[in-house]
Image (spheres, rainbow, N blue to C red):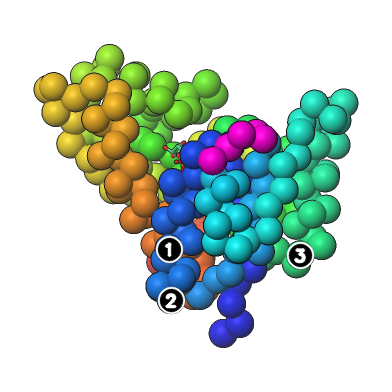
């Protein structure tokens, strides 16, 4: 099977991107990251990609009047490189309708909770863990899902639970959830690259 061409979108530190790079380097994922795009100039993920010899681009949203035009630019860059799979690895912006239509069933996102808990509009990054602690749930976790038009509503590929401890802080909980994220994202990408995921309604069947 030819290796899957991956485009990654990031906004921040890029530890999930790093776990993907490492898994590909170790030969565990039949894919190749062709391009990493960040909407933030100072995102450390850009440096991680550069260190791995991956092409990077910073695209400034402010250079575009409308969200759609900004998304169009990203689509163009992905089309140029023949991208098969788009991975959102800590990308904190919502994709346009056109983007989702173009790559339907081929966009994967990682979210640091057990969806459908602690997700949706405004529930991202550290806020997720704050809300988890505030609510007092005993279990949280991570979810990898396909992206649809909603926020965190697409078909779920894999999830894993993380216990919440009485003395957890946002930092300690985030660290333990991230460890799980670093296993789940490459695992989901690996399954995609082996053509083992099929979407049936809301369900993802792993073949
Ligand atoms: C992760 O928790 C991811 O799930 C969330 O933002 C965080 C990004 O971490 N969407 P990193 O940039 O991959 O280090």
Q: Is mark 2 within 8 Å of ligand 1?
A: no
Do the numbered discs 3 and 1 sit on residues whose CB atoms are within 8 Å?
A: no
For residue 188, say whether it is visible. Answer: no
* Quadrant of image for the N terminus: bottom right
Write the start and end of the magenta stretch as one range.
Answer: 40-44
Q: Which mark is residue 27?
A: 2
**Residue 153, percent from left and from top:** 52, 38
Of all residues, the one furthest to the top in this rendering is 134
Nearer the N terminus, badge 2 or badge 1? 1
Secondary element at tag 3: loop
Disc 3 to disc 2, C-alpha distance: 22 Å
Is 24 on the left-hand or right-hand side of 68? left
| Mark 2 and mark 1 residues within 8 Å of each other at the beta carbon | no
Q: Is residue 106 above or below residue 148?
A: below
Q: CA distance from mark 2 to mark 1?
A: 9 Å
**Vertical position of residue 16 compared to residue 198: above or below:** above
Disc sitting over residue 22 in the figure: 1
């Amino acid at each position: 099977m030819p290796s899957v061409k991956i485009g990654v979108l990031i906004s921040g530190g890029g530890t999930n991107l790093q776990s993907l790079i490492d898994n590909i380097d170790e030969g565990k994922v039949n894919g190749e990251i062709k391009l990493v795009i960040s909407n933030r100039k100072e995102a450390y993920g850009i440096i991680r990609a550069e260190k791995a010899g991956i092409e990077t681009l910073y695209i400034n949203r402010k250079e575009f009047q409308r969200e759609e035009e900004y998304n169009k630019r990203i689509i163009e860059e992905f089309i140029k490189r023949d991208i098969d799979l788009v991975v959102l690895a800590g990308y904190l912006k919502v994709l346009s309708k056109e983007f989702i239509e173009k790559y339907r069933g081929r966009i994967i996102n990682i979210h640091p909770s057990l969806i459908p808990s602690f997700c949706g509009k405004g529930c991202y990054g550290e806020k997720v863990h704050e809300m988890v602690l505030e609510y007092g749930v005993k279990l949280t976790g991570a979810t990898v899902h396909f992206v649809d038009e909603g926020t965190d509503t697409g078909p779920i590929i894999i999830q894993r639970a993380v216990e919440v401890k009485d003395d957890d802080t946002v930092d300690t909980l985030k660290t333990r959830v991230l460890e799980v994220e670093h296993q789940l994202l490459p695992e989901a990408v690996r399954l995609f690259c082996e053509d083992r995921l099929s979407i049936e309604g809301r369900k993802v069947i792993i073949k």
